[in-house]
């Protein structure tokens, strides 16, 4: 189990997230593994789609213009902190906070490829184990991984939620697709920014190349 092999895979260090270019981190997160350990059940998935949100200047960001509320407070936390918010009053969305403490850059994890605990994921979501939608899209992946608002504000290096690097897995640039983000049409011209990164051809990616 991955929970017993952290040393083999390697936890992502804080220095990984301490980067001023949130787009670079979104790209680098592809292929990394997100793990949850909840109620003695371990689930894990490889990140295959991620979106960058560039703090104060990005109209699609919850922190645009320096907005700071109880909802987005964790965006201003330490790099490598989780930021979970609820979309449409029902769908949890998990983000990774980046850049320096106090600068609210974040990367939304949009899709995972299941690696471990798919039976648990199926139970949580009511889907078939081979259903490609089980972790396709940010709401689905949070349900499958057992992620809710209580996991917001946690440092992603220990249970119940953490990120691993897989030294045996690499992604060449030709495998990476880049497009505009999904569901940010109200962000004006910033809606067209090419801040979405995904692994081409992966069945769990949530949008088309034309997105």
Image (cartoon, rainbow, N blue to C red):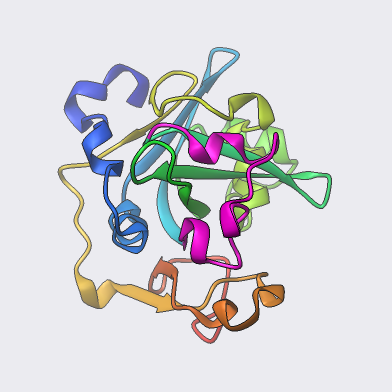
- Residue 117 sits inside the magenta stretch: no
Q: Nearer the viewer, residue 112 or 59?
A: 59
Quadrant holding the C terminus = bottom right
Residue 159, located in which quarter of the rendered image?
top left
Determine if residue 1 is in view.
no
Q: How many marks?
A: 0
Q: Considering only vertical position in the picture, is 13 above or below 158?
A: below
Quadrant holding the N terminus = top left
Residue 179 pos. (x, y %): 46, 79
Seen in the image, is 193 located left or right of residue 14?
A: right
Residue 36 pos. (x, y %): 49, 27
Name the residue furthest right: 89
Residue 189 pos. (x, y %): 58, 83
- Residue 73 sits inside the magenta stretch: yes
Question: Which residue shows up at 44% across the image and 39% down it?
Answer: 102
Name the residue furthest front: 66
Q: Nearer the viewer, residue 136 or 148?
A: 148
Seen in the image, is 124 located left or right of residue 102?
A: right
Residue 119 pos. (x, y %): 58, 33
Q: Considering only vertical position in the picture, is 203 above or below 31?
A: below
Residue 26, located in which quarter of the rendered image?
bottom left
Question: Which residue shows up at 20% across the image and 51% down it?
Answer: 169
Q: Nearer the viewer, residue 143 or 24?
A: 24
Seen in the image, is 176 located left or right of residue 37?
A: left
Name the residue furthest top: 40
Question: Which residue shows up at 60% across the image and 35% down it?
Answer: 73
Task: Tell me the magenta residue range.
Answer: 52-78
Determine if residue 121 is in view.
yes
């Amino acid at each position: 189990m991955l929970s017993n092999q952290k040393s083999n895979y390697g936890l992502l260090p804080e220095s990984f997230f301490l980067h001023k270019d949130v787009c670079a981190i979104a790209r680098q997160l592809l292929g990394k593994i997100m793990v949850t350990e909840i109620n003695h059940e371990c689930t894990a998935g490889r990140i295959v789609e991620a979106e960058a949100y560039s703090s104060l200047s990005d109209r699609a960001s919850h922190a645009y213009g320096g907005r700071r509320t109880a909802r987005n407070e964790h965006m201003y936390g330490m790099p490598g902190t989780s930021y979970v918010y609820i979309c449409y009053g029902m769908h949890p969305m998990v983000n990774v906070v980046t850049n320096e403490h106090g600068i609210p850059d974040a990367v939304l994890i949009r899709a995972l490829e299941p690696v471990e605990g798919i039976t648990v994921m199926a139970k949580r979501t009511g889907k078939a184990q081979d259903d490609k939608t089980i972790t396709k899209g940010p709401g689905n992946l949070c349900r499958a991984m057992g992620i809710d608002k209580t996991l917001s504000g946690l440092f992603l290096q220990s249970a119940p939620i953490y990120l691993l690097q897989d030294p045996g897995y690499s992604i060449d640039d030709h495998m990476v697709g880049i497009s505009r983000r999904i569901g940010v049409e109200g962000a004006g011209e910033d809606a067209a920014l090419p801040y979405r990164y995904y692994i081409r051809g992966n069945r769990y990616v949530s949008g088309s190349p034309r997105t």
